[in-house]
Structure formats: structure tokens, C-alpha cells
Amino acid sequence: MIRHIVMWKLKDHAEGAPKEENIRRMKAELAALPSKIPFIREFIIGVNARPGDTSWDMVLSSGFESWEDLAAYQDHPAHLEVGKFVGKVRSERAIVDYED
């Protein structure tokens, strides 16, 4: 299984909305991806329940059968569309991809 982990810190205010509203929208848009991209095997979205100075606001843990499936996910139009919004509201992003 290929694991793709992404963490985000969001801006306090972006796209005319406060961080909390953007977190809700981002979570909803991400949650819709597995129904649009059939080769996603696992997809878990978490919102940080204990914010702090060293915390991240959201995390996505996803799984794919192969590196090719991960690459296809990253290039899929539905993923790219969500990425447009995420790019506007995030201040930082960290990614780890690994095979287990």
C-alpha cells in the first residue's frame, strides 16, 4: 500500500471566510473525492481538536495500491479542482509519501 499523508495550516481568513468555515468547506470537498476517483483505497480526513502554536489544522491520510495510482489521483481533474481552493486558504503544507 502506498500511503499519502498531507497536513495543512490554514490562513486565519481567506476567500472571504474565517478559518473555521474554510476548514468545513475543505473537509467537505476532500470527502467527496473517493466517490469521484475510484482508485482511492483509503481516505481519512482529520481536523485538529487541540489547536496550538505547533499544531496543524487538518490532515489527510490516504492509501493507494501503487505509485501509479497515487500519480493518477494527483493529476485527476476532481483532485486538481479541490486543490485550487486549498491553495487559496492554506498557509503551509507538509507531505509524506511512503510504502508499507
Image (cartoon, rainbow, N blue to C red):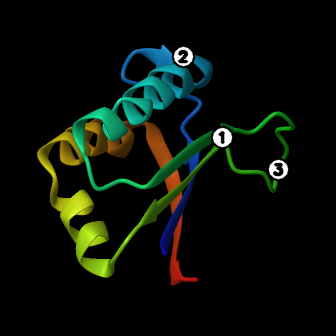
Residue 77's place in the image compared with 73, above or below, is: above
Crowd band around label 3 with a 10 angstrom C-alpha radius: few (<14), some (14–19), many (20+): few
How far is mark 3 from mark 2, CA to CA? 20 Å
How far is mark 3 from mark 1, CA to CA? 18 Å
Residue sitting at x 31%, y 68%: 70
Residue sitting at x 37%, y 28%: 29
Mark 3 or 2 closer to N-term? 2
Which one is in front, 55 or 1?
1
Q: Give the label on residue 46, or none.
A: 1
Which one is in front, 80 or 90?
80
Q: Nearer the viewer, mark 2 or mark 1?
A: 1
Residue sitting at x 45%, y 21%: 25
How far is mark 2 from mark 1, CA to CA? 15 Å
Q: Give the label on residue 53, or none.
A: 3
Hey, what amino acid is under mark 2? Answer: Glu
| Residue identifier under label 2 | 21
Residue 2's place in the image compared with 25, above or below, is: below
Residue 30 located left or right of residue 10: left
> Which element type, helix, strand or loop, lies under badge 3?
loop
Residue 36 located left or right of residue 14: left
* Disc 2 and disc 1 in contact, CB within 8 angstroms: no
Mark 2 or 1 closer to N-term? 2
Tell me the quadrant of the picture where the C terminus can be found: bottom right
Hey, what amino acid is under mark 3? Answer: Asp
Crowd band around label 1 with a 10 angstrom C-alpha radius: few (<14), some (14–19), many (20+): few
